[in-house]
Image (spheres, grey):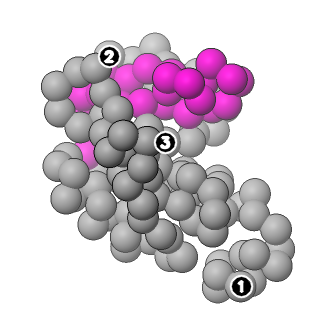
Amino acid sequence: MTLDDYNAFCASLPATTHVVQWGGAHVWKVGDKVFAIAGWSEAEGLGVTFKVSELAYDILREQPGCRPAPYLASRGMKWIQRQTGESVDDAALCDYLLESHGLVAAKLTRKARADLGL
């Protein structure tokens, strides 16, 4: 997945905003909460970080090309960074980004979700 593909997919999700921060990371938010970050990776290519369920975290953290997200996972949060498409191809990554959007949106207040049309 290219950075353009990542940005286009995240932009297609409802009630999202985009900002470039933290040294050039492309950060996508639903409401005021982050659901995806791209650009941080020690591997070649695009590193994409996203929130996952506990089960997905337990599975993905052991898969080649994925790891617990630096900084976020060390604080007990269930975030994964996909460094390569070895275990999570681009189609699966889009599914995980959609799930991350939903997980984060579900944690917004009822009023915030209503204001965003969610």
Residues shaded magenta: 65-90
Q: Is residue 16 above or below residue 5?
A: below
Q: Is residue 52 at least partly visible in the picture? A: yes
Q: Which mark is residue 107?
A: none
Q: Quadrant of residue 39?
A: top left
Q: Is residue 6 left or right of residue 76?
A: left
Amino acid carrying mark 1 in the image: Asp
Badge 2: residue crowd in 10 Å (few <14, some 14–19, many ≥20): some
Q: Is residue 71 above or below residue 21?
A: above
Q: Is residue 88 magenta?
A: yes
Q: What's the distance in space between the residues labelled 2 and 1, CA to CA?
A: 40 Å
Q: Nearer the viewer, mark 2 or mark 3?
A: 3
Residue 51 placement (x, y as % from top left): 56, 42
What numbered label is drawn on residue 64?
Answer: 2
Give the residue displayed 37% in from the left and 73% down from the top: 12
Q: Nearer the viewer, residue 82 or 4?
A: 4
- Quarter holding the C terminus? bottom right
Residue highlighted by disc 1: 115
Q: Which residue is mark 3?
A: 50
Relative image position of residue 104 (x, y in whole percent)? 65, 55
As drawn, is 92 to the left or to the right of 54?
left
N-term mark: 2 or 3? 3
Q: Residue at x 19, y 59 (%)?
A: 4
Residue 76: x and y in percent read 70, 24
Q: Nearer the viewer, mark 2 or mark 1?
A: 1
